[in-house]
Amino acid sequence: MPEFIPVIKKDDIQRQITRIAAAISADYQGRELIMIGVLKGAFLFLADLVRELKLEKIKIDFLQASSYGADTVSSENIVLKKDIDVDIRGKDVLVVEDIVDTGLTMARLIEHLKRHDPNSIRICAMIDKRERRKVAVNVDYACGCVEEGFLVGYGLDYAENYRNLPEIYHMKL
């Protein structure tokens, strides 16, 4: 049985979402925003974030990439499993991710989305984790930075388990 060490409490998550939602709302005021959630991990974060935004025009879509499988380290083999359906040509795009870790997945997704010729692409992550960063990726909006550990809860998983935990934990096997 793994040990779960609390890293970010539920109330702190909500406070940080409110904070970055205000910044995003200010930055995109009067513009249409296309929010692209990265499945599966970002679905809870995206849902809570969208409800806090003060914008009139928001479209939501999803894409899915995988690099971890059932391990605690990235395989570095990034597989795009689901592409977007909405047209982002000439639009402002905000990619919403649960965690940016090595940066490899995010760099691959940004490269892919740029082929659709958007006006802009920015990154919003629940967690900006730089411990294993291998590719320079600029996270424009982050709820928090965590230096180390394998994290689960609030959408983050280990082998598809523990996404349902209401807070973020460091999991020790």
Image (cartoon, helix red, strand yellow):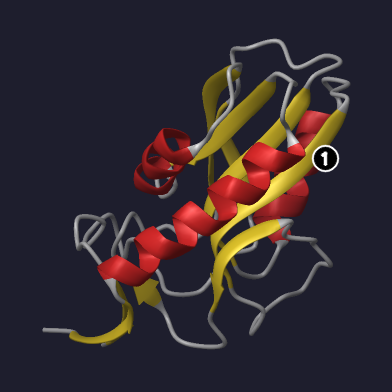
The residue shown at (65%, 62%) is 76
Furthest toward the left, the residue is 1
Residue, disc 1: 111
112 to 76, vertically: above or below: above
Q: Point out the image quarter for the C terminus.
A: bottom left
Residue 70 visible in image: no
Indicate the position of residue 131 as horizontal and vertical percent values: 64, 85
The percent position of residue 94, horizontal first and vertical second, equals: 68, 37
Image height of 103 relative to 46, above or below: below
Query: On the rendered structure, is 73 left or right of 114?
Result: left
Q: Is residue 57 above or below residue 115?
A: above
Q: Nearer the viewer, residue 173 or 47?
A: 47
Q: Where residue 152 appears, x then y in whole percent?
A: 32, 69
Amino acid type, mark 1: Glu
Q: Where is 172 relative to 95, above or below?
A: below
Q: Residue at x 63, y 55 (%)?
A: 77
Q: Nearer the viewer, residue 78 or 28?
A: 28
| Horizontal side, residue 143 vs residue 162: left or right | right
Who's the residue at 67% across and 79% down the image? Answer: 130
Quadrant of the drawing holding the N terminus: bottom left
- What residue lies at 27% left-to-right and 54% top-to-bottom? 160
SS at badge 1: helix
Residue 173 visible in the current orientation: yes
Q: Quadrant of residue 128?
A: bottom right
Q: Between residue 120 and residue 65, name the one nearer to us.
A: 120
Can you tell which quarter of the image residue 156 is in? Answer: bottom left
- Within 10 Å of the Cα at label 1, are there few (<14), some (14-19), or many (20+) other Cα atoms? few
Which quadrant of the structure image shows residue 5? Answer: bottom left
